[in-house]
Image: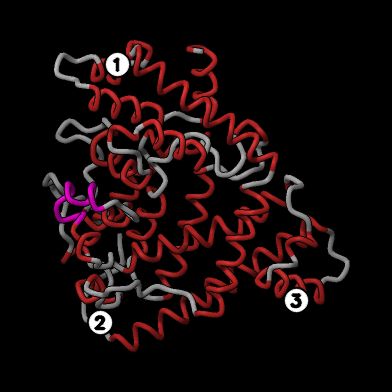
Amino acid sequence: MTKPSGELAPYAAHEAQGKGRRYQEPAASYRGEYQRDRDRIVHSTAFRRLVYKTQVFVNHEGDLYRTRLTHSLEVAQIARTVARALLLNEDLVEAISLAHDLGHTPFGHAGQDALNACMGEFGGFEHNLQSLRVVDELEAKYADFPGLNLTFETREGILKHCSARNAQELGELGERFLSRRQPGLEAQIANIADAIAYNNHDVDDGFRAGLLSLDELRQQALFDEQYLAVHARYPQLEDRRLIYEIIRSMINKVVTDLIDNTTRRLESLAPDSIEDIRAQRNPVVVLSDAVYKKHTALKQFLSKHLYRHDKVREMTDKAKLMIEVLFERYMSDPGQMSGEFCLSATADDANESTKARVVADYVAGMTDRFAIAEHDRVN
């Protein structure tokens, strides 16, 4: 069961004041509504596929690197910690965290960029919007409705970013992007927990892969501060455990700062409800200026030295080409797709735009290894 509303802050997402589901359902006997959302996400096909979708390195390159699934679990862990400290709704923040990458393509951001380019004539491709399509339409499990029929608050958190053009078609869910309002605090927490998780854990994967050296990492203030503290305490610690202790310390540093700084902002704003949070022009869940500067510097360092590393670029270039080939083959011959995707793309009323969106749905849902196998089959 979720916490009784009396244990949550007044500006938390309270289920009793929630905006409900798109399709009415009877309440569950032993679970709250956001817990049901979390459970539906965990049982979804798209969630299971995340185990074979890349974070930075293509899935088959090693068993120890992060996948979209392990990343989502790490985001949920960080987000729940922050939500608990701020007396917010832990079930909701976990549901959002676990669902935020459901619409991601195979091959990480390289796959997303390639698919967006392929869809240029047909409205483009946004992975956050695709995550919403997955939970609203593409998951086919229930007799009474399409998708997972999640609550408004979970869907609000999943849609972190959205173009104005697409927001205009989303009704109440898209309104905040047009009026420059904020989502609830739980959604804001999941958003920044995502950035904290991938920043710190990409350091781990990059070091493990031999693409980032200790000397390079020590050029970053956030890393070096924790390196000096850990090394002083454990001067003989070998690199593997040294890096892990540094990453633990970095996460603790950033998360503690986030909780403390957000607490001060909430005390200053004194909101009475989640609507007071939504009315803000800027996010309320934020890092202090000093820690944000170090956090952002580390992100920029990773972009230059890891994501653009020759080894990673070689992989991403191949991945983009595979996505382009798959999109082209399926557009020219939709019969190459399976099941409902083939039927939808070849229906009598399916125009080129409809067909392209079906192809994008099909390609985006692939795992890395299935996309590789399909590319080999159709090419």
Q: Which residue is mark 2?
A: 271
Per the image, label 2 sits on a secondary structure element best described as loop
Measure the alpha-carbon separation of dots 2 and 3: 38 Å
Count of number-bearing discs: 3
Q: Is residue 1 magenta?
A: no
In the figure, residue 276 lies in which quadrant? bottom left
Task: Determine the residue positioned at 80% across, 62% down.
Answer: 215
Measure the alpha-carbon separation of dots 3 and 1: 57 Å
Tell me the number on the disc at residue 229.
Answer: 3
Instruction: Kindly check if marks 1 and 2 are in contact, taking CB atoms under 8 A apart as contact.
Output: no
Most common SS among magenta residues: helix
Few, some or many C-alpha atoms within 10 Å of disc 1 (few <14, some 14-19, many ≥20)?
Answer: some
x then y, percent, for residue 289 = 51, 79
**What kind of residue is marked 3?**
Ala
Q: Which residue is mark 1?
A: 342
Tell me the number on the disc at residue 370.
Answer: none
Q: Is residue 353 left or right of residue 68?
A: left
**What kind of residue is marked 2?**
Pro
Magenta-drawn segment = 164-174
**Where is the N terminus found, in terms of image quarters?**
bottom left
Per the image, label 3 sits on a secondary structure element best described as helix
Q: Earlier in the sequence, mark 3 or mark 1?
A: 3
In the figure, residue 316 lies in which quadrant? top right
Q: Is residue 172 magenta?
A: yes
